[in-house]
DNA sequence: GACGAAATTGGAATAATTCTAAAGAAGGCT
DNA sequence: AGCCTTCTTTAGAATTATTCCAATTTCGTC
């Protein structure tokens, strides 16, 4: 069994859980994110999936990405007002935005640190999502 | 001496440090942020400052806000793709976005925790800014 | 008071995303 | 199989926060 099939099954399962249909468009969009995990924008995903499904529209790419986010298969990642990027890494992680290259990198976030961060919230504040973003340079960006 | 004057002096000082001029527009924009620290958008700042400087333009409000950010007197705060909000709190702090009310609140960030968060970066990653944002509900939002 | 640089202004332009309305699948039922 | 309903996709228009532009105004200096 290829990893591709494994992913398709995970997608079909999550879609079914949400009462949504599986479609070629959703499969190819999800696969585009999994194949090259460099936090692409919707436009970049559009370019990738057109090679596999030439008739797909940009609106559909936006629709599919939104669906994947709703299904908790993908995270939308925002940095300042730049175009939204998409990340299929489901582990708790922070993002590092390299100012030199414009690239975005995952930073593993230890569970205990996540708990410590949540603990700074005063009583009554109930968070259901945390975003941690670094901006800076990697001295040897290549 | 009023707190107003103190702030004007801080502004004049920082502008001079950056080789920029002090102007009525910059003063009134900065004062609008200091007077009601609820993370207003540029539009909201525009509405406030028009009462004091009726001829001011929205473009100038954007220009002044950008200048204040460059001078490190104000932080630009982004939440997903919503309009940028502006915060004159210079202490290290996180932001909590209340989904119920749409309001944004400052969360003090202890210095040692900030250090621990920076420590998760692998060697070679050099961050010069960190954004920490919570999204959730305050049970008794009023 | 003239000069050059910096700042402001109104309006046009930009660009990511969302909306809309119509056409195209798909699933369930008989 | 045929019908019905619902979901999905599609192309293009609309939205909107922000930026850009060219023309004026203001400011500091000589
Ligand atoms: Mn795959
Ligand atoms: Mn004041
Ligand atoms: Zn990621
Ligand atoms: Zn703040």
Image (cartoon, coloured by chain):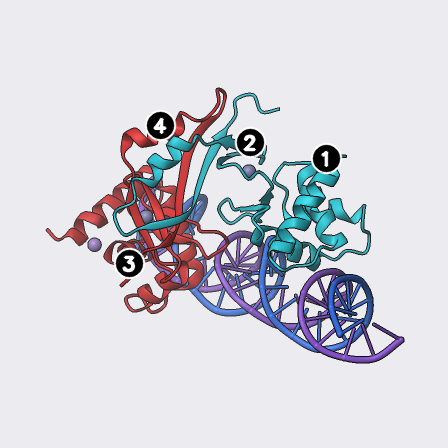
Chain colours: A red, B cyan, C purple, D blue
Q: Which mark is drawn over residue B3? A: 1
Marks 4,2: beta carbons within 8 A = no
D27 to the left or right of B89:
right
Q: Which numbered disc, 3 or 4, marks the residue closer to the eye?
A: 4
Relative to the observer, which residue lies in front, A31 or B4? B4
- Whether callout 3 and callout 4 share a subunit is answered yes
Label 1 CB, ligand 2: below 8 Å? yes
Position of the N terminus of chain B by quadrant: top right
Q: Earlier in the sequence, mark 3 or mark 4?
A: 3
Q: Which mark is drawn over residue A116? A: 4
Q: Position of residue A92 (x, y in %)?
A: 30, 38
Quadrant in which ligand 4 is drawn: top right
- Whether callout 4 and callout 2 share a subunit is answered no
Marks 4,1: beta carbons within 8 A = no
Q: Earlier in the sequence, mark 1 or mark 2?
A: 1
Rounded to the nearest angstrom, the CA distance separating label 1 from label 2 is: 33 Å
Marks 1,2: beta carbons within 8 A = no
View extreme (left): residue: A1
A114 to the left or right of B103:
left
In the rendered view, would you say B64 is above or below C6?
above
Q: Position of residue B138 (x, y in %)?
A: 52, 25
Residue at 31% x, 44% y is A73
Relative to the observer, which residue lies in front, B135 or B114? B114
B77 to the left or right of B52:
left
């Amino acid at each position: 069994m290829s990893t591709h099939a494994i992913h398709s099954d995970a997608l079909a399962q999550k879609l079914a859980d949400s009462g949504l249909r599986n479609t070629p468009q959703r499969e190819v969009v999800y696969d585009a994110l999994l194949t090259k995990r460099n936090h692409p924008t919707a436009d970049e995903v559009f370019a990738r999936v057109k090679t596999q499904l030439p008739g797909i529209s940009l609106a559909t790419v936006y629709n599919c990405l939104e669906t994947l986010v709703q299904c908790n298969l993908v995270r939308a990642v925002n940095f300042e007002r730049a175009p939204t990027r998409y990340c299929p890494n489901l582990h708790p992680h922070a993002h590092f935005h390299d100012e030199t290259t414009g690239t975005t990198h995952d930073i593993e976030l230890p569970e205990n640190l996540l708990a410590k961060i949540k603990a700074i919230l005063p009583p009554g504040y109930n968070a259901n999502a945390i975003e941690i973003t670094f901006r800076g340079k990697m001295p040897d960006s290549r």
